[in-house]
Image (spheres, rainbow, N blue to C red):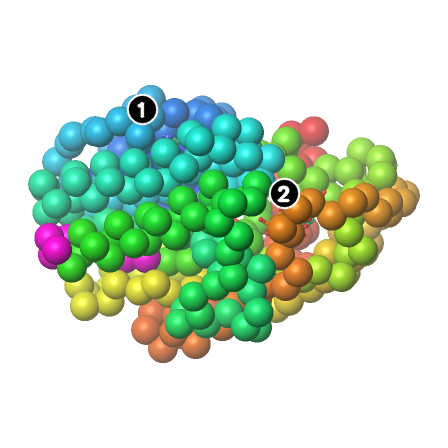
Amino acid sequence: MIGKKILVTGGSGFIGSHLCERLLNEGNEVICLDNYFTGSKQNIVHLLKHPYFEAIRHDITMPYFMEVDEIYNLACPASPIHYQFDAIQTVKTSVMGAINVLGLAKRVKAKVLQASTSEVYGDPVIHPQTEEYWGNVNPIGIRSCYDEGKRCAETLFMDYHRMNNVRIKIIRIFNTYGPRMHPCDGRVVSNLIIQALKGIDITIFGDGTQTRSFQYIDDLIEGIVKMMNTDDSIIGPINIGNPNEFTILELAKKIIDLTGSKSKIVFLPSPLDDPKQRKPNINLAKSTLNWEPKIQLNDGLIKTIEYFKTVI
Ligand code: NAD
Ligand code: UDP
């Protein structure tokens, strides 16, 4: 007997492919819907032979209809380089994508989870960030297509819940890394590992004192699935991230140590609106989901370095 029928939008991306794998392993039928903008068939090729896995090429800005029990809405480019490449399409993906999955959830009475982001806090003045904090977001900057798109998606989720009783879940994901990150997407962990492995200059934007808190992919997947499996009264938003905070310079030094690289660090201008600090308060995730991250940065980096050795 198979379990639930589950739609994962953005299922061939970094996080989506790990999520599809987990849901299949739990005995569910999984439909992966993706336009392959930043995802790839390579990420899901090992799943294609699975009898309960289906991959569909579709752009989430267009409606899609199917009978499903649950929807995980992950479709959206996540790296600054990719979401700024076509900023209008990024807004459409977040906003029209949310309207389309919420419309579907309403019609077939499915439960729907939104992969929101710590970017809704912008360049935060409250540290660490709690879910009550409304954020400090530039509405007209180069990151706004992503930040404001995701904020509007949260609004739509709440409004479909209040107006149409759609069963929703919102998680705010903090910086996540691991195998199957796109090697060219420019995010800091993948960039620095690839530079270290190739022995080329390690690029730090700004002076490297800005902070991030890095979560390994397996911890995130556990948190996402736990959130979906809560009862209908739990809607979030709930932060899912690792509260261990590092400066980007500390991260670079760790990666140089772990790879034994001879690369040297170079400092480049900081991108516009680059948040100076980011660290989740995860008390709500601990108390509501009985979840907290288990994988330390060193251990996660070692696994990720091994992965990138196979792809470069
Ligand atoms: P990713 O770029 O690897 O995956 C996104 C997937 O969505 C890709 O497969 C892409 O092809 C697909 N996609 C993009 N636009 C689409 C569209 N219009 N229609 C259909 N598919 C589309 O990124 P990721 O890191 O796996 O992120 C997944 C989700 O998690 C995103 O919504 C992102 O905002 C969110 N998130 C990620 C992080 C992180 O650190 N990785 C942090 C916060 C939030
Ligand atoms: N960053 C960096 N060098 C790089 C890529 C990124 O110093 O090669 C910095 C970036 O300016 C930011 C941090 O690392 O301060 C995290 O960037 P990323 O794009 O991974 O994620 P986000 O800014 O969305 O948290």
Q: Which residue is mark 1?
A: 58
Q: Nearer the viewer, residue 49 or 280?
A: 280
- Asked which quadrant contains residue 27, the reply is top left
Q: Which residue is mark 2?
A: 187
Q: Which residues are magenta?
A: 163-170
* Crowding at mark 1 (Cα within 10 Å: few <14, some 14-19, many 20+): some
Residue type (three-letter) at the residue carrying disc 1: His
Quadrant of the image for the N terminus?
Answer: top left
Please tell me in which quarter of the rendered image ligand 1 is found.
top left
Residue placed at 37% from the left, 58% from the top? 171
- The answer to whether any part of residue 207 appears in the image is yes
Q: Is mark 1 within 8 Å of ligand 1?
A: yes
Q: Secondary structure at mark 1?
A: loop
Image position of 109 (left or right of 148): left
Judge whether residue 101 is colored magenta. Answer: no
Q: Is mark 2 within 8 Å of ligand 2?
A: yes
> Label 1 near label 2: C-beta < 8 Å?
no
Judge whether residue 165 is colored magenta. Answer: yes
Residue type (three-letter) at the residue carrying disc 2: Arg
Query: x, y (%) of residue 6?
Result: 23, 41
Residue located farthest toward the top when viewing the structure as drawn: 57
Quadrant of the image for the C terminus?
Answer: top right
Q: Earlier in the sequence, mark 2 or mark 1?
A: 1
Query: x, y (%) of residue 39?
Result: 47, 30
Query: x, y (%) of residue 166?
Result: 15, 53
Q: Nearer the viewer, residue 171 or 163?
A: 163
